[in-house]
Amino acid sequence: MQSGKLDSALVEPTPQSARESSPEDGNYDPLHDPVIELLACLAAQLAGQDPDRRATIKLGGVVAFDDVVWRYPDFLARADAAYRILAADQPPA
């Protein structure tokens, strides 16, 4: 992935709801993690990236990201936002 095509949010933390959930959570949804992965893959594809391609992003010699593209924080944040809308009892007007 070329760093010029990425948002500047390279080192932002992953939103809590986009992290893996566990049965100990009060609002555990067993479909959350697979749906987040699917939505993140779609977000990566819409951004013109291959979601399964491995990407390494370095900032000043420090590795800021080294994983498959769909796990890039921006794609996870977009997936989480879409998940919240789709899972809401009443979608926004």
Image (cartoon, rainbow, N blue to C red):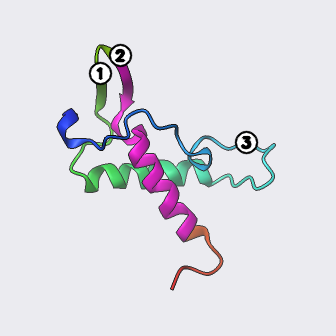
**Secondary structure that dominates the magenta span:** helix
Q: Is residue 7 above or below residue 92?
A: above
- The reply to whether the C-beta atoms of the residues labelled 2 and 3 are less than 8 Å apart is no
> SS for tag 1?
strand
> What residue would you read off at disc 3?
22
Inter-mark Cα distance, 1 to 3: 31 Å
Q: Picture coordinates of residue 75 (x, y %)?
A: 39, 48
The crowd level at tag 3 (other Cα within 10 Å; few <14, some 14-19, many 20+) is few
Nearer to me, 90 or 30: 90
> What residue would you read off at disc 2?
62
Residue 73 on the magenta segment:
yes
- The reply to whether the C-beta atoms of the residues labelled 2 and 1 are less than 8 Å apart is yes
Q: Amino acid at mark 3?
A: Ser
Mark 1 or mark 3, earlier in chain: 3
Residue depth check, mark 1 versus mark 3: number of the one nearer the observer: 1
> SS for tag 3?
loop
Q: Residue at x 48, y 63 (%)?
A: 82
Q: Is residue 86 above or below residue 35?
A: below
Magenta extent: 63-85
The crowd level at tag 1 (other Cα within 10 Å; few <14, some 14-19, many 20+) is few
Q: Picture coordinates of residue 21 (x, y %)?
A: 67, 44
The quadrant of the picture occupied by the N terminus is top left
> What residue would you read off at disc 1?
58
